[in-house]
Image (tube, grey):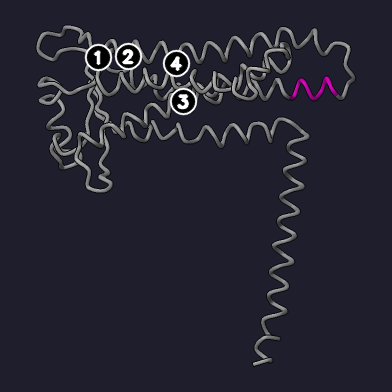
Amino acid sequence: MGYIFFSLAKPFDMDPETLMYFVSFYTGVYCVNISLLAVQFIYRYCAIFSVDYLKYFRGWKSFIWVFYCLFFAVQWLYGVHYMLIPDETTKSYFKQEILDRYSIQDNQVPLRAFMAYDPATGAIRLRNTMFTLNITIIMGVQYGVMIFCGVTMNLKMEARIRNLSSALKKHHKQLFRALVFQITSPTIFLFSPLIMVIYLPFFNIQLSFPAGATVCAFNFYPAMDVIIVMCVVTEYRVAAKKIWISCWKRSGRSEASSRVTHPMTQEAY
């Protein structure tokens, strides 16, 4: 029926209200991440089909994308900080749950709470619903940009590579496969966990589980994005393998050298 957003950490013994600003800031950082993902797809599209627009990714003009990310991040942060302020209804509803699970009072931690319906009347809580609408629009814009750029690149790519050599065709097809996986990966690790958390309360299902484990899926995405490119694109995979072998050989030589020099040092003493 709802969820709570809080932190048990208390760095520098800050009071809960001050800590809440940092918790809200964390959600803004998450929004910056998904916004940068959309910017990455825009850049790829321009690099292939609209080279003239690459000027907006260079020099001072690149700050356009900084403001783009911050625009959505501020909206997300504002929604968390002001639309999820706990009232008497949410405090009484979650008080026992927090006490049972974490053995703390709700006023001891920085806390924001969401409830889809009023437990007494069953009416939709408008302010909390507006928060869901707010982040749905933000996620929809970013995901829509990714899908539009990805699909358009696929449709136009066939015509673009038709007259290229076999090697270049293979390379472009590998890049497209990487693109498909790079759309699928954030869908699984960035969007799906959050969608599950924010929409589950509207189904009025009585569940009690720590969503932190679900939200931890966010942290898998940066590594997955790199792994996808390494696995799909042959040139990157070969280059990474060469670097790995070179580093392994260097570490082996340095270890052998230390084994040889160590007894000589003992003899000198």
Report how far apart the C-alphas of labels 4 and 3 lie in the structure.
Answer: 11 Å
- Residue 5 appears left or right of 104: right
Give me the residue at 73% from left, 38% from top: 237
Question: Cβ–Cβ below 8 Å for labels 2 and 1?
Answer: yes
Residue underneath mark 3: 32
Q: Which type of secondary structure does the marked residue at label 1 adopt?
A: helix
Mark 1 Cα shell of 10 Å, populated few (<14), some (14-19), many (≥20): many
Please tell me whether residue 227 belongs to the stretch shown in magenta. Answer: no
Upstream in sequence: badge 1 or badge 4:
1
Report how far apart the C-alphas of labels 2 and 3 lie in the structure.
Answer: 18 Å
Percent of width and height locating residue 146: 57, 15
Please tell me whether residue 173 belongs to the stretch shown in magenta. Answer: yes
Give me the residue at 11% from left, 8% from top: 121
Give 169 or 70, whichever is nearer the viewer: 70
How many marks are shown on the rendered structure?
A: 4
Residue underneath mark 4: 139
Q: Which type of secondary structure does the marked residue at label 3 adopt?
A: helix
Mark 2 is on which residue type?
A: Thr
Percent of width and height locating residue 192: 44, 22
Report how far apart the C-alphas of labels 2 and 1 lie in the structure.
Answer: 7 Å
Give me the residue at 20% from left, 8% from top: 124
Upstream in sequence: badge 1 or badge 3:
3
Give 101 or 87, whichever is nearer the viewer: 87
Disc 2 or disc 3, which is closer to the eye? 3
Name the image quarter holding the C terminus: bottom right
Question: Cβ–Cβ below 8 Å for labels 2 and 3?
Answer: no
Upstream in sequence: badge 2 or badge 3:
3
Residue underneath mark 1: 128
* Part of the protein shown in magenta: 168-174
